[in-house]
Image (spheres, helix red, strand yellow):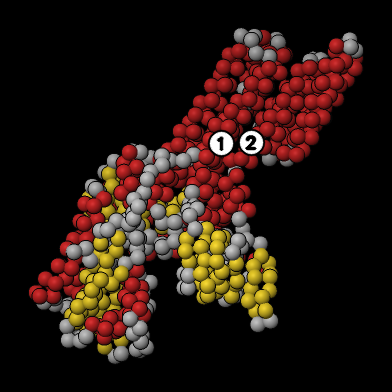
């Protein structure tokens, strides 16, 4: 029954109860009984309809127990009890529906942010159209105060954009030419024109809503158990009520037992907590793809981190170019030409550096092939190039001279990734690239340890010098370097065999197998590859590690809340049943306490909607440590 319908029925039956009270004081007993019976029939009709619908689905519902009890009360002439029970049940359902809405407020807030229209630049002028009519390739105009309706690239203008709908971050981000913007974000100040890359259901924002909706519908292990339990428990109560009558010969006692034993609070105790917890995560930029994942996350005691884009910012820059037999710009130009087909951070960094130096990337590129975890090979301008790490050089039988090895090691010890470039089986250059540790990383890792994580490990494809620098700086328990994707999977499996409950955090295509293998996989949303986000159980939408710390703390709070609700629900039923058998609790008063226990459970879960993990101050500026990276 809808919230409005319940409110209407409760109002009518409540008025009839008051009328019956007036007739009672006026000593008009016949009119009093008519009012009570009318109230019982009006509210009872809707309860009985719902019980019948459940029976057709072969389910023993709480409404069925109430209906049986009310019919029994009418037969034995307990009109006050029957009217009070039906009124309280309907009124409780109204309050329950209204209060439950608050636990879903996060999702509703998200849906409210969905853009409904957009201004498209057309040859005939600016045209305002429905967001549903946008197509890929549209050039969309967004002014100050308007909501972005597409995922796309800025082709003109600049603006401060509030990206809270995507990242949970309320501080506006400065965006300019060639920057990416996302549907659902708001232009706080400025003016931009965006070329649409994704529209409608394909936008990141639409996928977020879809994932949150799906997650809130999925059931936890505890919830599945309670559902099975309720299916057995409810018909058992009917049998036990019959036994109570047979032993006591007291119809009222048997009916009271029937109503009081209803498992209403118990059935909703777990899902209401989970919906509130998942909604809280969504508001803070953490997408948890289901209740069971939330339970698993709360039990994690070992975390494995990827390096690049996870512990470091994933925005590397070229710090040095060393060439042998050609000039530096020519080396950069030819390597960048090959890397134009690569989606890896490092390849893109090299291409960006070439464009920054205005080098022409117009050579013929053939037979390009990405070798995961190692680099790539390609034919550029007729020459065969091998670009990547030492392993790739060894696999291709390319010797590294002593002075080149010495130079590479020197660069790596300084915190750089050394990318070897060879052509015609001879190394002709090294391009050094460096990254920075994320400013919030240290604080987030400390919070994770404080909340119960026993061990933190880094697995990276990068060289051992850089891995050690990052591990030491962040106080990790171990840092394993120069790993391929399958090596990361092996490490995850090994830790699981040792009894750890493992979470893997990564962002790249090469992390996807380890994310799928871990007990809980977490992917970065903005900088991460699509396959990582699809494989992962949890997505951190703004790529911030403090979101992970919040998610871990929230998962523990959610599971605690579930347990509290279960204790409240079970405890209330036990106390009431004891009261019934001792003759201290009666039908109407028992129903009142029963409905109150349902509300207490919901109100307890609502606390999760506003839950915040302990606030931490972030460093004022980015960590100055320069780090290399390659194939992390």
Q: Would you say 398 lies left or right of 83 here?
A: left
Compared to residue 621, the image places residue 325 above or below, namely below
Q: Which mark is residue 606?
A: 1
Q: Residue 445 in the image: state x and y as whole percent.
A: 32, 46
Q: Which residue is mark 2?
A: 99
Q: Would you say 454 lies left or right of 226 here?
A: left
To which quarter of the image does residue 578 belong? top right
Q: Residue 577 in the image: state x and y as whole percent.
A: 60, 16
Q: Are marks 1 and 2 in contact (CB under 8 Å)?
A: yes
Give the residue at x 61% y 58%. Answer: 114
Give the residue at x 56% y 69%. Answer: 191
Q: Residue 15 in the image: state x and y as whole percent.
A: 82, 25
Pointer 2: residues within 10 angstroms few (<14), some, or many (20+)?
Answer: some
Mark 2: which secondary structure?
helix
Q: Taking the image as drawn, is residue 319 in sight?
A: yes
Q: Taking the image as drawn, is residue 463 in sight?
A: no
Q: Earlier in the sequence, mark 1 or mark 2?
A: 2
């Amino acid at each position: 029954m809808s919230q409005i319908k319940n409110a209407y029925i409760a109002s009518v039956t409540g008025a009839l109860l008051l009328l019956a009270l007036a007739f009672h004081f006026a000593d008009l007993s016949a009119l009093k009984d008519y009012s009570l019976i009318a109230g019982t029939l009006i509210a009872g009709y809707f309860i009985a309809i719902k019980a019948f619908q459940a029976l057709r689905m072969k389910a023993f519902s709480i409404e069925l127990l109430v209906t049986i009890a009310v019919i029994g009360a009418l037969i034995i002439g307990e009109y006050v009890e029957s009217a009070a029970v039906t009124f309280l049940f309907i009124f409780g359902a109204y309050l329950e529906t209204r209060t439950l809405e608050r636990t879903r407020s996060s999702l509703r807030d998200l849906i409210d942010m969905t853009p409904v229209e957009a201004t498209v630049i057309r040859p005939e002028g600016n045209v305002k159209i429905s967001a549903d009519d946008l197509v890929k390739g549209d050039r969309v105009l967004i002014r100050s105060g308007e909501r972005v309706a597409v995922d796309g690239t800025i082709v003109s203008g600049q603006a401060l954009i509030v990206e809270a709908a995507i990242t949970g971050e309320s501080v506006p981000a400065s965006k300019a030419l060639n920057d990416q913007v996302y549907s659902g974000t708001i232009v706080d100040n400025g003016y931009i024109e965006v070329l649409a890359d994704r529209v409608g259901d394909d936008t990141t924002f639409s996928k977020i809503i879809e994932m949150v909706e799906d997650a809130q519908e999925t059931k936890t292990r505890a919830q599945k158990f309670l559902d099975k339990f309720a299916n057995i428990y409810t018909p058992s109560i009917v049998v036990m009520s019959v036994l109570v009558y047979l032993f006591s010969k007291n119809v009222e006692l048997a009916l009271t037992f029937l109503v009081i034993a209803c498992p209403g609070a118990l059935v909703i105790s777990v899902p209401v907590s989970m919906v509130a917890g998942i909604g809280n995560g969504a508001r803070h930029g953490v997408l948890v793809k289901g209740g069971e994942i939330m339970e698993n996350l709360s039990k994690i005691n070992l975390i494995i981190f990827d390096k690049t884009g996870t512990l470091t910012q994933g925005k590397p820059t070229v710090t040095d170019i060393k060439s042998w037999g050609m000039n530096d710009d020519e080396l950069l130009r030819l390597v960048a030409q090959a890397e134009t087909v690569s989606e890896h951070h490092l390849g893109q960094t090299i291409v960006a550096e070439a464009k920054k130096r205005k080098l022409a990337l117009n050579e013929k590129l053939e037979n390009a092939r990405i070798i995961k975890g190692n680099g790539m090979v390609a034919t550029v301008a007729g020459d065969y190039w091998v670009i990547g790490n030492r392993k790739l050089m060894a696999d291709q039988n390319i010797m590294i001279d002593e002075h080149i090895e010495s130079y590479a090691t020197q660069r790596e010890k300084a915190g750089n990734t050394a990318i070897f470039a060879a052509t015609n089986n001879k190394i002709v250059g090294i391009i050094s690239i460096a990254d920075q540790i994320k400013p919030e990383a240290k604080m987030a890792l400390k919070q994770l340890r404080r909340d119960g994580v026993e061990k933190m490990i880094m697995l990276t494809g990068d060289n051992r010098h850089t891995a050690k620098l990052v591990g030491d700086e962040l106080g990790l328990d171990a840092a394993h370097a120069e790993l391929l994707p399958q090596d990361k999977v092996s490490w995850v499996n090994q830790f699981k065999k040792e009894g750890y409950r493992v979470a893997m955090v990564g962002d790249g295509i090469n992390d996807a197998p380890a994310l799928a293998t871990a007990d809980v996989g977490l992917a970065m949303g903005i900088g991460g590859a699509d396959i990582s986000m699809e494989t992962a159980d949890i997505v951190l939408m703004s790529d911030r590690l403090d979101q992970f710390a919040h998610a871990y703390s929230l998962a523990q709070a959610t599971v605690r809340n579930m347990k509290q609700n279960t204790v409240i629900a079970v405890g209330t039923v036990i106390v009431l049943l004891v009261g019934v058998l001792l003759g201290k609790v009666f039908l109407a008063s028992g129903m009142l306490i029963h409905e109150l226990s349902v509300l207490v459970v919901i109100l307890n879960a609502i606390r999760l909607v506003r839950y915040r993990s302990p606030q931490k101050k972030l460093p004022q500026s980015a960590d100055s440590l320069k780090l290399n990276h390659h194939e992390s």
